[in-house]
Every structure is written in C-alpha cells, then in structure tokens.
C-alpha cells in the first residue's frame, strides 16, 4: 500500500513536470490499452530515459519496467528505482558473467504477468535518434513465451507503442505517443514451433511499430529523405501524414523555419534560473549521447529549477511577505509555461552535434 502511494505521488510529479517541459503531448490509440489483464508494452526507443516517462504517464495501468542494468550501480539509486517498479536487464556489454542474473529477472517478469499486471520493454535493445525501427531482439518474446509456458491459463497481450518526437533533445518537446492494436500471444505460442512463434511475434510488433512512429527505411536514401522532411518543416508528430509522404516519396516544398519571437522571454527565464542553468551547461558538456540530452535537461528542470524557484520564493517571503513570495513563484512558473507552449518547434535540430556525438 505504501509503495503504491509512493509510486502514485512520484509519477504524478513526473507527469506535472512533463506538462511544463512539453509543448504538446499527443496521445493516440489510448483505447487500445486493455483495462485489466497481463499486458506487455513493446516500445520503440529514440530518446533515452524520457521515453518510458511519456508512455507510463499517458496510460492508466501501473507499469513495471525493464531498464539497462548500468542504471542500478549506485545502491541508493537502486533502491529508489526498485521502489518505482524498475528492474535491471543485463546485456553482453555488461559482462557475460552478468547475463545469468537475467534468469531471476525473467522469473519476476513471469510473476508480474501472471498477476495480470503490465510490463514495459524496449525490444530494439538500445536507444537511437534515427527515425526508423531497428531489428528487434528476441528478449521480449522469451519473457512472453516463458510466462505462457509456466502459466497454462495465462493470456498476454502485447501492445506495440510508437514514440515520435518533433526534435530529439530539443526544448520544448513535442511528441506523439501512439498505442497500437493488442496482439494476443497464447495462440501464437501454442500452434507454432518456438522458433516460428518468436519470428511471428517479432514481425507483428515490427509491422505495427513502423506504422505507429515515423519510420524511414535505414538504407542509402535515409539521409536524403530525412533532409527533405526537415527542409519542408514537416510536423513529425503527425505520424500518418509523414509516413504517407515517405511511402509515396512526395514531399512539400522547402520552407524556412519559424522565427522565435519569444527569445527575450527565454533569456528572462534563464536569468531567473541562473544557478541551475550554469550547472546544466557544465553537466551537458559531459553528455556523450544526444539521446540523453532530454533525460538530463528534464531532470534538471524538474528538480533543480523547482527547488530554486521555491528557495527564492521563500527568501522573498521572508523579507517582503508571503504574498510577494507566492507571486514570484507563480509568475516564474507562468513564464516557463508560456514559453513551453508557444515557442516554435522547427523540424531542424536546435542543437548541433559533431561526428563523435559531442555538442558543438
């Protein structure tokens, strides 16, 4: 009971933060999420640890997550993550000897699904900013079919989820979360050989993910296609429209990016958040992967900016009264909200990176 209350409070706070961080969160197919019973969400993975945040805050199920084991190295962080239903999954890069630990995790997953709960997995195996669906690993099929084999009366529905961002790692965020059609797995498992069942399930999930997110074939024409879409300033969160452009190889004419007339407001927000901003600039130089920019920037905004606004409000309250302190906090939050909701999100990246993935 206490853990559920903790879970609800934390995820409510995270959802509140995402509202202030995101220009628009478009949710499609929410009716496809089963209200009860075992569900495995199979999600594409373009943007680091913010991906599961957007998915879990846009459906009403209480989700359990499999995330890479490296996140659990710190004992204190490990306790916090486990309290929020996160579990580590080990990969070859974590050391071959560590792979044996996955069996214990799989057993936990079997139990979670047998209890009619939900599990979230990123079957591509890693994050990548490319607007494509990469080959899926068979790890998620091992969990699904392992649970079905162990629990003979269990049915597991796999719900593919597509995530598409207007720009990876640019603020404010504009994103579409697209829930696909549930795939019933018991019949696939029972009438096919194990190898064939794995291939069938992977193919069904892949097919849906390519429709649920903007997907450009990762071939020699990938960069050309992407450039045409960027030049046309398309709204990538209009997933069906953009996928139709790609399929027909017809693109709108080149358009200039929108001017950001709210830049003065942004500078005012930075000045008001100068200590978190300076700390962020220092930390951001150490981030090697573009896919983690949003993860860290969102975390800084959620925790440090909230803390400093409250601290500065407290100081003003102490010297000038509670009304002035409350007014300051309200205006600070309002300025952030106005910029987030009204600033343009052009198709071209706001942040440039060199070949090594470093911000320049």
Image: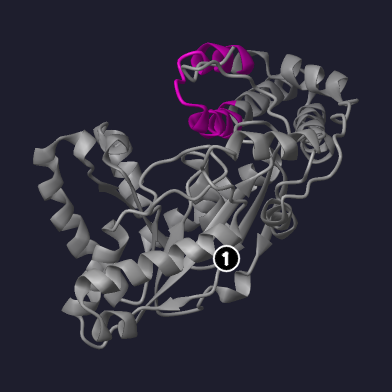
Q: As displayed, is residue 47 above or below residue 184?
A: above
| Residue located beneath label 1 in the image | 179
Q: In which quadrant will I find the C terminus? A: top right
User: On the picture, is 243 further left or further right than 33?
Assistant: right
Q: What kind of element bears circle 1?
A: strand
Q: Position of residue 77 (x, y in %)?
A: 32, 36
Residue positioned 87% across, 34% down in the render: 255
Q: Position of residue 212 (x, y in %)?
A: 59, 60
The colour style of the image is: one colour
Q: How many marks?
A: 1
Segment tinted magenta in the rendering: 277-304
Q: In which quadrant will I find the N terminus? A: bottom left
Question: In terms of image quadrants, where is residue 96?
Answer: top left
Residue positioned 82% across, 34% down in the render: 344
Q: Is residue 293 magenta?
A: yes
User: On the picture, is 19 further left or further right than 216?
Assistant: right
Q: Is residue 32 visible in the rendered structure shown here?
A: yes
Residue positioned 25% across, 81% down in the render: 192
Q: Position of residue 320 (x, y in %)?
A: 80, 20
For the stretch drawn in magenta, the main secondary structure is: helix
């Amino acid at each position: 009971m206490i853990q559920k209350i903790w879970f609800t409070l934390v995820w409510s706070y995270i959802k509140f933060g995402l509202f202030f961080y995101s220009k628009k969160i478009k949710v499609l197919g929410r009716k496809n999420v089963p209200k009860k019973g075992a569900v495995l969400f199979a999600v594409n993975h373009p943007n680091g640890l913010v991906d599961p945040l957007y998915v879990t805050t846009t459906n009403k199920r209480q989700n359990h997550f499999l995330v890479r084991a490296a996140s659990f190295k710190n004992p204190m962080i490990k306790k916090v993550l486990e309290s929020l239903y996160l579990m580590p999954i080990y990969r070859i890069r974590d050391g071959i000897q560590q792979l044996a630990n996955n069996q214990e995790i799989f057993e936990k997953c079997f139990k979670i699904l047998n209890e009619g709960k939900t599990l979230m997995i990123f079957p591509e195996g890693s994050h990548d900013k490319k607007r494509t669906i990469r080959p899926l690993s068979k790890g998620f099929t091992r969990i699904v079919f392992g649970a079905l084999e162990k629990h003979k009366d269990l049915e597991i529905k796999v719900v593919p989820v597509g995530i598409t961002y207007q720009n990876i790692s640019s603020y404010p965020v504009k994103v579409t979360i697209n829930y696909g059609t549930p795939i019933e797995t018991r019949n696939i498992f029972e009438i096919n050989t194990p190898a064939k069942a794995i291939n069938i399930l992977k193919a069904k999930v892949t097919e849906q993910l390519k429709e649920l997110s903007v997907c450009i074939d990762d071939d020699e024409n990938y960069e050309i296609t992407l450039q045409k879409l960027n030049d046309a300033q398309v709204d990538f969160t209009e997933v069906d429209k953009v996928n139709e452009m790609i399929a027909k190889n017809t693109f709108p004419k080149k358009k200039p990016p929108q001017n950001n007339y709210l830049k003065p407001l942004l500078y005012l927000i930075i000045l008001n958040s100068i200590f978190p901003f300076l700390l962020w600039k220092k930390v951001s130089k150490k981030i090697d992967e573009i896919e983690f920019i949003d993860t860290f920037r969102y975390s800084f905004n959620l925790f440090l900016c909230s803390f400093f606004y409250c601290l500065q409000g407290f100081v003003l309250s102490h010297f000038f009264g509670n009304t002035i302190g409350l007014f300051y906090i309200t205006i600070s939050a309002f300025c952030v909200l106005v910029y987030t909701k009204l600033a343009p999100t052009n198709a071209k990246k706001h942040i440039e990176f060199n070949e090594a993935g470093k911000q320049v």
